[in-house]
Structure formats: structure tokens, C-alpha cells
Amino acid sequence: MKIGVLAVQGDFEAHGRALERLGAVAVYVRVPADLDGLDGLVIPGGESTTMLKFLENEGLFGAISNFAARRPLLGTCAGAILMATVVCRPAQRSLELMDIAIERNAYGRQVDSRIATLSPSSEFAERTAAGPLEAVFIRAPIIRRVGARARVLLEYHGDPVLVEQGPHLAVTFHPELTTDARVHGLFLEKASAK
Ligand code: GLN
């Protein structure tokens, strides 16, 4: 299975390694033609405004929109911001793939990064594996509203942190920075569905 990782900035190589540990081939995506033949695409963390400008300037905004109509996307942190239907503080354009409203940098500057231990929902545990999940949050957004088309798979203190909509997943933490492979594993299962 070939999975693209948008390689604009941020920790895209950590995603590549996480995917390769699970047996996928990681392809770094910088131009629209790089999307050809991929089974799925990861949009990593970083700075979502910078990433948005890159997508617009390189013709990737439209190309990824088209790709997402056919194949699954996993957006982490800034990637989740780019996938949301509504982005606030400040508002910005997005791919509108996930029926959520998301607030940027919502944990505030004082506590902008943390490692938390999540208790998986029974659905997440059944679809992956049981047991606590370590989640790294870095200047993370908070999902403030989940619409009818999206479903929450993981929460932290009552806030959704992993949301699914059809083939797509959006996560506000960084699953590529721990050795827990469950989020990437769930994504690969979705990407292997033809
Ligand atoms: N704070 C960043 C933004 O708003 C996201 C942070 C991240 O991806 N780690 O774009």
C-alpha cells in the first residue's frame, strides 16, 4: 500500500516512519502529480496557515480536494485544522472534509504542549486494541463542535480528539510521535478498502 505524506513542513518524516513500521510505503507529496496512484494521504502537523498557503500556491488545494473524494485522508493537528469545515481563532479557508468546528491553539500559550493518557472508547478499542493511549499535544486545536456527519472515536477531558467521517480521520494530537501504532493502523485499514 502506498500512502502519501504531505511534505511541506513539520514532522512529515515521523509519519513516514510510522507508516513504514506498519508495512506501508510512504511517498512524500510536494506537487499534485505526487498524488497519482496513492491509496491514502496524511496531512501532518505544522503551522496550518503556512501549509494552506503552500497548498494554494502549488495547486495542491484543489488536487487534494479531488483526491479526498476518492481516497482516505488522515489529518493530524494542523492537518485536522485544514480538514475541518469551520476554523476559528482566526478563521481560515479549509478543505471542508470533516463536519467539525475547530479552534486553533485552543489550550493557550501557557500550556501549549503536553503528553496525556487517553482512555479509548469501546469502539476504538474494538477496532484497534484495548489499553490506554499516550497522546502528544503540541499547540493543539480543540474540536468545539461535531456535526451529524462526523463521529468521535477518542476524547480527552470531554473534548473530541479523534474524529471519523466516512473514509477520513482527523486527530488533534501527534500519533507519529509515539510508538503506539493504533491511529495509523486504523487509517491503513481504511486506506486498504477499495
Ligand atoms: N498551532 C498550529 C496551527 O494552528 C497547529 C499545531 C500543530 O500542528 N502541532 O496551525
Image (tube, helix red, strand yellow):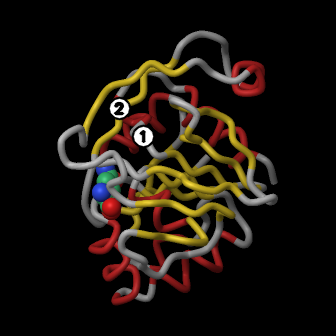
Q: Which quadrant of the figure contains the C terminus? A: bottom right
Q: Is residue 12 visible?
A: no
Residue 19 in picture, x, y percent from top left: 48, 38
Query: Does the Cβ of the disc 1 residue fall within 8 Å of ligand 1?
Result: no
Mark 2 neighbour density, 10 Å: few (under 14) some (14–19) many (20 or more) = some
Q: Residue at x 36, y 52 (%)?
A: 106
Image-based side of 180 in relation to 120, left or right: left
Q: Whereabouts is ligand 1, in terms of quadrant?
A: bottom left
Q: Which mark is residue 136?
A: 2
The one of 54 and 157 positioned closer to us in this rendering: 157
The furthest residue to the top: 131
Q: Residue at x 45, y 28 (%)?
A: 21
Residue 162 in picture, x, y percent from top left: 59, 41
Q: Residue at x 56, y 54 (%)?
A: 144
Image-based side of 102 in relation to 123, left or right: left
Residue 111 in picture, x, y percent from top left: 23, 38
The one of 187 and 49 positioned closer to us in this rendering: 49
Is residue 132 shown above or below 111?
above
Image-based side of 10 in relation to 155, left or right: left
Q: Check if mark 1's residue and mark 2's residue have beta carbons within 8 Å.
A: yes
- Where is mark 1, residue-wise? 173
Mark 1 neighbour density, 10 Å: few (under 14) some (14–19) many (20 or more) = many
- Going by the numbered disc 1, the residue's amino acid type is Phe
- Going by the numbered disc 2, the residue's amino acid type is Val
Marks 1 and 2, how far apart in space?
A: 5 Å
Q: Earlier in the sequence, mark 1 or mark 2?
A: 2
